[in-house]
């Protein structure tokens, strides 16, 4: 009995001790739980705070005029030790590294000729061709080419398809179609049946995104680019309607290819048309084709450049045809707080992989449209004498500023 009593006493003591520990633990947990919760919240807040936040998105792009390395430029290049690098050999004078992208109008198809580079046929003015073996060098400078012009189809429908294939191979984007307007009767062999090709297209351009920890990343941002080809005609309402549709979804830039050749000022027909493009929502109109640099204007707070001139071309018989104004565009995202840049970048990455359904992807995402603030400049270029494009002199820069009416236009734009 004594042993049983001792055992019971010990058992009771153990149970009391366990109970006491349990009570103390419960009290401690009740007391400490708020503090633990507060510590977790503070820790979560610190982690969130430590993640870099986007503070700005900006880019600098260069728009170049008529670009072409065929015919006489090709002859000089083949005779030079530089070979296919010849026409590009002084483009670094324009400080390519300062720009996120270059966009230009490619005034020729890209068709393999089996080593025959200078046939009599190619010497004819309406039979342009640019050898695709220049593309490894061209891709070091150009991000995208406009194909909506009166020479992109000079090698026929098959040549136009080959052109797009070569550009895809070298990762150079393109947009636009050389389909004629109903009233344009130039070049009867010109492919007017460029099926299922929109005059507008999505081009993905790199943009610098800055964070509050002083770091930066490159995002891929979709823009819409629209062509409007009509050397002796005027694009129909369907062209303008497509511009309006794209402009409602993404920032849209019009690059028409038209206008009277070898004239120093624009005509009323082009003025009315380009202003209408602005009315339909495009951000700016940057045009070429006349082979001379023409004037600019500000319309409803937007820039119109009537002709940039020959950026890379084989005409050298006068100063006018061997110079151009390359337009520089510095832009910054204005509605940063409203735009999901991560989502836009994801769309841009998808579009680079598959541009076929890019517009549909953007429409389906229903994202807030980016709005940008723009600052403009220009660089005078020349290819006089040797057909090598380079930065022009300060005197030529001043002369082109007068031709462009640049100061007046910039004042009207508030710059």
Image (cartoon, rainbow, N blue to C red):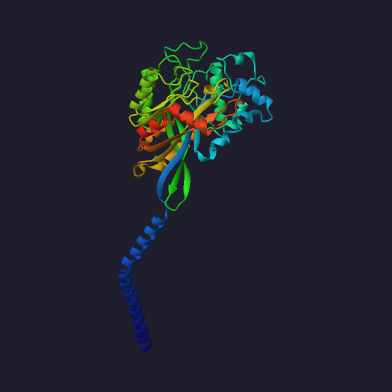
126 is higher (above) or lower (below) than 133: above
Of residue 121 and residue 7, the one placed in the foreground of this image is 121
User: Which quadrant, please, contains the N terminus?
Assistant: bottom left
The percent position of residue 233, horizontal first and vertical second, equals 42, 14
Of residue 232 and residue 164, the one placed in the foreground of this image is 232
Q: Residue at x 39, y 59 (%)?
A: 46
Of residue 298 and residue 14, the one placed in the foreground of this image is 298
Q: Residue 391 sits in which quadrant? A: top right
Q: Report whether 181 appears left or right of 31.
A: right
Q: Which residue is drawn at 33% across and 69% down?
A: 32
Q: Report whether 169 appears left or right of 6.
A: right
Q: How many numbered dots are placed on residues in this image? A: 0
28 is higher (above) or lower (below) than 85: below
The percent position of residue 13, horizontal first and vertical second, equals 34, 82
Residue 355 visible in rendering:
no
User: Which quadrant, please, contains the C terminus?
Assistant: top left
Q: Report whether 118 appears left or right of 411.
A: right
The percent position of residue 129, horizontal first and vertical second, equals 58, 20
Q: Residue 70 sits in which quadrant? A: top right
Which residue sits furthest front?
395
Of residue 327 and residue 345, the one placed in the foreground of this image is 327
The percent position of residue 167, horizontal first and vertical second, equals 55, 28
Residue 295 visible in rendering:
yes
Q: Residue 40 sits in which quadrant? A: bottom left
């Amino acid at each position: 009995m004594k042993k049983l009593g001792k055992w019971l006493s010990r058992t009771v003591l153990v149970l009391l001790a366990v109970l006491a520990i349990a009570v103390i633990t419960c009290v401690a947990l009740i007391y400490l739980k708020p503090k633990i919760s507060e510590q977790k919240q503070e820790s979560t807040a610190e982690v969130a705070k430590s993640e870099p936040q986007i503070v700005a998105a900006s880019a600098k792009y260069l728009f170049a005029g008529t670009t072409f390395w065929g015919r006489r430029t090709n002859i000089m290049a083949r005779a030079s030790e530089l070979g296919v690098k010849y026409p590009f050999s002084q483009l670094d004078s324009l400080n390519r590294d300062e720009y996120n992208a270059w966009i230009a109008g490619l005034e020729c198809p890209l068709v393999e000729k089996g080593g025959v580079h200078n046939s009599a046929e190619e010497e004819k003015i309406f039979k342009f061709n640019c050898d695709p073996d220049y593309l490894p060098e061209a891709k070091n400078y150009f991000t995208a080419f406009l194909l909506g012009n009166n020479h992109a189809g000079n090698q026929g429908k098959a040549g136009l398809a080959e052109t797009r294939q070569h550009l895809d191979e070298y990762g150079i984007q393109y947009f636009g179609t050389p389909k004629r307007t109903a009233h344009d009767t130039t070049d009867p062999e010109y492919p007017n049946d460029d099926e299922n090709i929109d005059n507008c297209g999505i081009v993905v351009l790199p943009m610098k995104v800055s964070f509050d920890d002083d770091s930066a990343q490159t995002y891929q941002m979709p823009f819409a680019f629209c062509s409007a080809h009509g050397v002796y005609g005027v694009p129909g309402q369907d062209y303008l309607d497509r511009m309006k549709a794209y402009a409602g979804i993404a920032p849209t830039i019009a690059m028409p290819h038209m206008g009277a050749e070898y004239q120093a000022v624009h005509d009323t027909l082009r003025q009315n048309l380009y202003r209408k493009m602005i009315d339909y929502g495009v951000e700016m109109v940057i045009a070429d084709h006349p082979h001379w640099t023409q004037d600019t204007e500000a319309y409803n707070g937007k820039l119109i450049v009537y002709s940039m001139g020959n950026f890379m071309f084989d005409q050298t018989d006068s100063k006018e045809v061997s110079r151009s104004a390359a337009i520089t565009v510095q832009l910054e995202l204005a509605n940063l707080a409203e735009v999901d840049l991560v989502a836009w970048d994801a769309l841009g990455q998808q579009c680079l992989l598959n541009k076929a359904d890019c517009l549909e992807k953007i429409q389906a995402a229903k994202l807030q449209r980016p709005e940008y603030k723009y600052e403009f400049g220009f660089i005078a270029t020349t290819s006089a004498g040797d057909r090598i494009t380079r930065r022009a002199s300060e005197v030529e820069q001043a002369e082109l500023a007068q031709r462009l009416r640049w100061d007046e236009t910039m004042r009207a734009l508030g710059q």
